Image: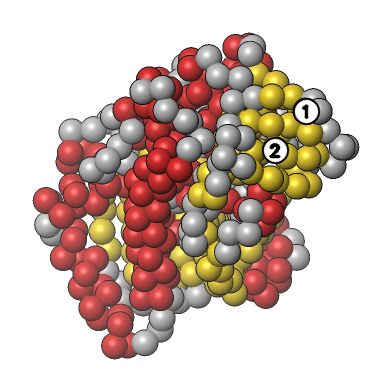
Amino acid sequence: MSDGRFDVIIQGAGMVGLLLARALAPLGLKIALLDAKPVQRWQGGEWQLRVIAVSTATERILRRLGVWESMARVSPFRAVQAWDAVGRGSVLFDSADIGEPHLGHIVENGLIQTVLYDRLLQDGGLTVSIPAAIETVQADAERVAVTLADGRRLEARLLVGADGANSRVRALCGIEVDQRGYGQSGLVGVIRTERPHGEVARQRFLPDGPLAFLPLADGRCSIVWSQPTEQAERRLALDEAAFCAELTAASARMLGEVQGCGPRAAFPLQRLHARRYIAPRVALIGDAAHVVHPLAGQGANLGFMDAAVLAEEIERACRADRDIGGLGTLRRYERRRKGDNLLMQSAMDAFHHVFGSESPWLAVPRSLGFDLVDAAPPLKAFFMRRAMGAGPDLPALAR
């Protein structure tokens, strides 16, 4: 006997899973939201260490879902400047050159998660079971059944794995992944600099990994410093003054002296891509399907786009009176997202290889490439539009 019957079960109450739930809310579907861990609420005060660069396309999605206006703290950036530390080439992407007020916003992960979660609770019609961990998955021609660790059994027409890089749903469905560690960690923190950032995101490509300064609304910067894991561990152990001195040197004083730094943390960097995004009555979205290098800040935006496309395909199925968990619906989702995600992942790998090499044979063409892009307005405009989320097959929420 089933304890609960639903249209959609979403495993994962992170940003991507919550966005999917909000996008599906107007369809009147019966949705269950599960997560193995409690939702960590954003409290304001000091900036969280994990932030994302929200693209214009993602901003449109959040606006149309009625949650952007509730973001209490967002930091627009109007330009991105990048340097090659070895070859000395540089490029500046300025939103004014394409008639846009900004290229995106820096927003704390926890803030997006909290605003989406609160909106879903206000909406009603959503069954939330947190904490709840899935132990088994069984699918047949009409339904998918999951058994939870506490013994409950739930059924739905569709199960969505939005449960991160170590996805339990993906593992239970036997979906294999191509996975490789970079031997690097991303060191994050919030810093105070001698000179103002001017709403410009800055990135310096060092031989052992890129260093990004992301502008925050209070004048400080959030940093993401990709580096060999042993270096990250050593730098985490430094006192504030020693760390700020190393960061000042690594940044080539691009904002003068680094005058202060709050708490720091590091997370391992890896590449992961599921060989299939779907299984019978199951779809994977976000980090459960793909993880990319953070050097372009596109990982979360790709996940949001997954959720928006899957919601659109589910809506189309509802309007046409088709099965929302049927193979046709799921294949259309996979076809629309897998190629784009693979392309972005391959591009990030190429950047990591080219800019992570100290070879003099790569330094000159690398630097020349930066300078050529900087001198070619149409090319710069193309790159800016793509970074903002423009593409050939955007879901309606992002257009």
User: Could you say whether the residue bearing mark 1 is in a helix, strand or loop?
Assistant: loop
Q: Is residue 337 visible?
A: no
Residue 2, label in figure:
1
State the residue at coordinates (65%, 68%).
232
Which disc, if any, is residue 362?
Answer: none
Q: Which of marks 1 and 2 is nearer the N terminus?
A: 1
Give the residue at x 26% y 73%. Answer: 367
Quadrant where the N terminus sits is top right
Distance from Cα at disc 1 to Cα at disc 2: 9 Å
Which residue lies under the disc numbered 2? 145
Among the 4 quarters of the image, the one containing residue 56:
top left
Q: Nearer the viewer, residue 343 or 141?
A: 141
x, y percent for residue 256:
46, 55
Height in image: 287 above or below 348?
A: above
> In screen coordinates, is 11 left or right of 290?
right
Q: In this view, does 49 lie to the left or right of 254?
A: right
In the image, 84 versus 327, the foreground residue is: 327
Tell me the residue at 75%/65% (across/down): 237
Residue 83 placed where, x, y %? Answer: 34, 64
Amino acid at circle 2: Ala
Query: Label 2 near label 1: C-beta < 8 Å?
Result: yes
